[in-house]
Amino acid sequence: MSETSYTQRHGLDVAEELAAFVETSVLPGIGVEADRFWSGYAELLGEFASENRVLLDRRADLQGRIDAWHKARGNQPWDVAAYRAFLTEIGYLVPEPAPFAIDNGRIDPEIAQVAGPQLVVPVSNARFALNAANARWGSLYDALYGSDVMGPPPAGGGIDPARRDAVVARAARFLDEAFPLESGSHAEVTAYHADDGGLTATVGSSDGALRDPSAFVGRRVEGGDTGLVLRHNGLHVELVINPDHPIGAASASGLRDVVLEAALTAIQDCEDSVAAVDAADKVGVYANWLGLMTGDLADTFEKGGKPMTRRLAADREVTRPDGSTVTLQGRALLLVRNVGLLMTTDAVRLNGQDTPEGLMDAMVTVACAMHDLKKTDGPRNSRVGAVYVVKPKMHGPDEAAFADRTFTKVEQILGLPANTVKLGLMDEERRTSANLAATIQALRNRLFFINTGFLDRTGDEIHTSMQAGAFAGRDATRRSGWLKAYEDRNVLIGLNAGLRGKAQIGKGMWAKPDALAEMLQAKIAHPQSGANTAWVPSPTAATLHALHYHMVDVAARQDQLQGQPVPDLDALLTPALVGETPLSADEIAREVDNSAQGILGYVVRWVDQGVGCSKVPDIDDVPMMEDRATCRISAQLLANWLEQRLITSEQVEDALRRMAAKVDGQNAGDPNYIPMAPGFDGPAFEAARDLVLTGTTQPSGYTEPALHARRREAKALRRA
Ligand SMILES: CC(=O)SCCNC(=O)CCNC(=O)[C@H](O)C(C)(C)COP(=O)(O)OP(=O)(O)OC[C@H]1O[C@@H](n2cnc3c(N)ncnc32)[C@H](O)[C@@H]1OP(=O)(O)O
Ligand SMILES: O=CC(=O)O
Ligand SMILES: [Mg+2]
């Protein structure tokens, strides 16, 4: 039962808290009257809500036909030619467009020109959201010292001199690679000098310049620190000199830190990393986004036993050798991820019906961003007057065209110039990957990224071919040919569509937040593949991943790749089924336990505590980032194995119960935690059960319907 109270606006029933938030917090100062906002919203729903429904019905219709095709073929050998012909006949595959190039208008340099990390953060968490914005600049010393890159992370308390020296030496190696000196190493520098002639470094008895003197940008002073700002591959690096600081005092040159320009962009997420199921939750999410756009967001919390208040970082003013100044952005360029087309919300109702949540996100998040567009001086987000909306889970060109028209309408309602809103296309559903060029074309006037590597994409891979047979395990599914085709095609199709120098071609999330030594080894593959950004889960990961963009010149890599043949669709369309070599009973049992644990560990915090992104140890106790997309994969794999009779529902129930007890144990230290055992009947456990047992019939295998319903149930129980 909903607790929501409504107020009437232009024929809409609007939740009172949303109406109050829009009218008292969002609209004042952006030149849009409440009447205009709500009458426009009513028009938007009138024009787009039923089309949204038709697009969802089309998804279901195509899925039904694909399921029937696989079932009718039974055990016949896989025939990709027949499959392609069938997908073409039903309109799942559309004709390739003639060559074209995107024309996306003015785009900020963090997207169009410079390659670097993209951080993602649940915007519902103000402390994290601010931290993500401020992760534009990250201490390399802290990232190396505090992570596992230099060996097991420190237990805390005090500085270990041996570890400190190893960190300093590692950072000097980086400086030698990115900013080599004419002679000698940064490790040997006893003094850095900056004057109108540029930067010199003293090594032994001689002063030498940088091998590339133009890499020196200038100097800035902050408190007792002098920052010497360098630039390489478009990314800035600051040598922080302060001989009075304990770390600077231990260094002959007084170098106390090397600060990297790290998260060039940060996605403030209203989607899969948040749990927002009603008007109150949505207003919480929007309020943080609004605060980021006005610049006023602040959060006070306790850290290390002391209260601290976090705010957005200031810009950085740097004095060049010739005395002129340049202002460097202090914060990541902020993008906002809206929700997709699937869910409806009861925060705005029309004719007694809930309305598409994606349309509400479009109206409200763009209106909030207008506070940034209205700024005439001081720190701002977009310097070219753009709003960057990341649009997830679109299936193919028709849905992309729908998003394009939706934002045209939103721009008209809010009085914004056409194509102010730029869209990031998440290539995370198979119908988009298979029709990528046409999908890009549908967004050509506002596209600012295409990203791959997505976990949702694996979930959709399994769901789409649910009836084709049993999928190999989660890792094997992600190692097989379709994934390489998906990744490679995305880069090459993006380059063919003229994204170079205009938009991002991005790669996916590093989902092991604590395994950063491994990330440093592995994630260099992203820039090497021609991607000019890739997702990271934390500011520390952003700082470390930034090193990769110094090691690889992505623009040069894109030049090499431009014009290479795009891999054929066959590999993309071939599902990663178990095949000739069946999985052993042990392999199956281990995968079932692992998936059950991942689902429960995530779902219990989502449903009972409203936490949308969690760190959950896997079966080998490796902490994994779990969000709705990883949950979708685990649930879909178990649903597929049930459907294909590799496992039984009794096995699933047994694994869920055993793993629920394990997850309870893992959360024993959390005073707010509600154990799932021994009753196994609370909304969290029920949600996990729903996700697996109804996984074949959930739309596209999405987790939102089950999670939202159970979270609302948990909230109602708490109220009762
Ligand atoms: C499939 C997809 O859709 S991927 C996109 C969705 N995923 C995400 O957005 C991942 C976001 N990341 C996170 O939520 C977290 O990093 C987790 C849950 C994965 C791990 O969190 P933990 O390691 O437990 O973080 P913990 O609570 O210990 O915080 C450590 C510090 O890192 C910061 N931090 C961690 N992640 C982030 C982040 N994404 N952005 C900003 N700051 C962050 C915290 O603010 C905190 O610093 P503070 O104390 O100074 O505020
Ligand atoms: O949205 C991100 C994903 O991995 O899915
Ligand atoms: Mg996703």
Image: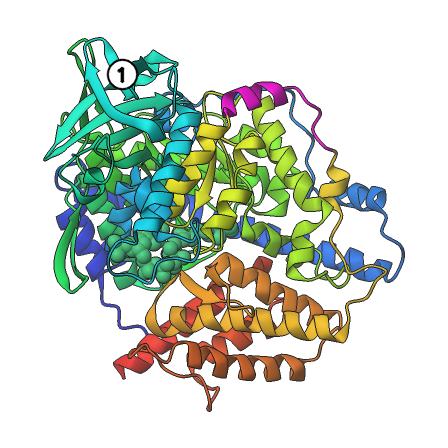
Along the line of sight, which residue is nearer the eye, 645 or 558? Answer: 558
The residue closer to the viewer here, 681 or 71, is 681
The quarter of the picture where the C terminus appears is bottom left
Above or below residue 356? Residue 306 is below
Q: Which residues are magenta?
A: 553-567
Q: Nearer the viewer, residue 672 or 53?
A: 672
Q: Is residue 274 visible?
A: no
Whether residue 416 sits left or right of residue 495 in the image: it is left
Residue 533: give x, y in percent of width and height. 46, 35
Q: Is residue 714 visible?
A: yes
Amino acid residing under circle 1: Thr
Q: Residues within 10 Å of mark 1 (few under 14, many from 20)?
A: many
Pick the residue in front: 130 or 77: 130
In the rendered structure, the answer to whether residue 594 lies left or right of residue 351 reads right
- The percent position of residue 84, horizontal first and vertical second, equals 78, 42
Give above or below for 561 relative to 675.
above
Q: On the image, numbered disc 1 is attached to which residue?
A: 200
Q: Residue at x 12, y 60 (%)?
A: 307
Relative to 703, is 184 above or below? above
